[in-house]
Amino acid sequence: MRTDKLLANMGYGSRKEVKKLLKKGGLLVNGEKVTDGKTHIDPENDVIEVFGEKVEYKSFIYLMMNKPQGVISATEDISEETVIDILEPEDVIFEPFPVGRLDKDTTGLLLLTNDGKLAHQLTSPKKKVDKTYRVHIDAPLEEGDKEALEAGVVLDDGYETKPAKLEYINGESGTVVNLTITEGKFHQVKRMFEARGRKVVALKRESMGPLSLDPNLDLGTYRELTDEEIEWLKSANE
């Protein structure tokens, strides 16, 4: 990889700013000063230092966000705040994007990455990746509702959903349930409950595949995945 591209990708500034950095002798590769931005570096094997600080280059970034309400799952929008707007500049430079989408008023687990291969695996219908949502409804379910939702219901456009799993949180008389689905149709969870005469009043995604939302993440905050979590995701979708 070209020196100037690597440094720009790592947040050391624009190509112009990187050029100034190189002229000042701020870059050492394997102990040797590099001043030409066209010089190629092997980020996997070369020892890279910028002004004495060792640089650990990474091609991919994997972020777990607790998405807040009012923010859309997109990389950019002319009028709405996006999940990318929440990120720090040092993370934005990797150009991550949301894996799948959560509705504007839905909260909870959202994965952002620039790893297109993994993103495709997690969202491909063929992989049948489980997604679990905490669902608050306006009235308790009645006899037959749980069985119908788990077997698959017909949505307002005629689509019949795949089998799901429903778990009561506060007993059958409560209005809070967990619903696990393997699809991601437009407003699917809300439309599934509408098919049984219930309105979803709050919705939060708790997990996606083997990855669960970190309980220490407040709404609107995020963190990088651990190496172990990344391996979980990759191994579960091979």
Image: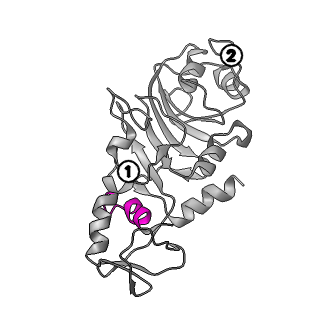
Task: State the quadrant of the C terminus.
Answer: bottom right
Q: CA distance from mark 2 to mark 1?
A: 40 Å
Q: Residue at x 48, y 47 (%)?
A: 112
Q: Position of residue 226 (x, y in %)?
A: 49, 63
Amino acid type, residue under disc 1 in the picture:
Val
Q: Position of residue 69 (x, y in %)?
A: 36, 32
Q: Residue at x 43, y 65 (%)?
A: 6
Of 213 and 49, which appears nearest the observer? 49
Above/below status of 3 relative to 66: below
Residue 11 covered by magenta stretch: yes
- Disc 1 crowd rating (10 Å Cα; few below 14, some 14-19, many 20+) is some
Which residues are drawn in magenta? 4-14
According to the picture, the residue beneath numbered tag 2 turns out to be 154
Above/below status of 212 relative to 169: below
Q: Position of residue 218 (x, y in %)?
A: 34, 48
- Disc 2 crowd rating (10 Å Cα; few below 14, some 14-19, many 20+) is some
Of 178 and 95, which appears nearest the observer? 95
Please tell me whether mark 2 sits on a helix, a strand or a loop.
loop
- Residue 159 location, quadrant: top right
Numbered tag placed on residue 92 in the rendering: 1
Q: Residue furthest bottom?
A: 31
| Residue 216 in view, yes or no | no
108 displayed left or right of 17: right
Of 104 and 155, which appears nearest the observer? 104
Q: Residue at x 43, y 54 (%)?
A: 94
Residue 161 covered by magenta stretch: no
- Residue 100 location, quadrant: top right
Q: Position of residue 201 (x, y in %)?
A: 43, 23
Please tell me whether mark 1 sits on a helix, a strand or a loop.
helix
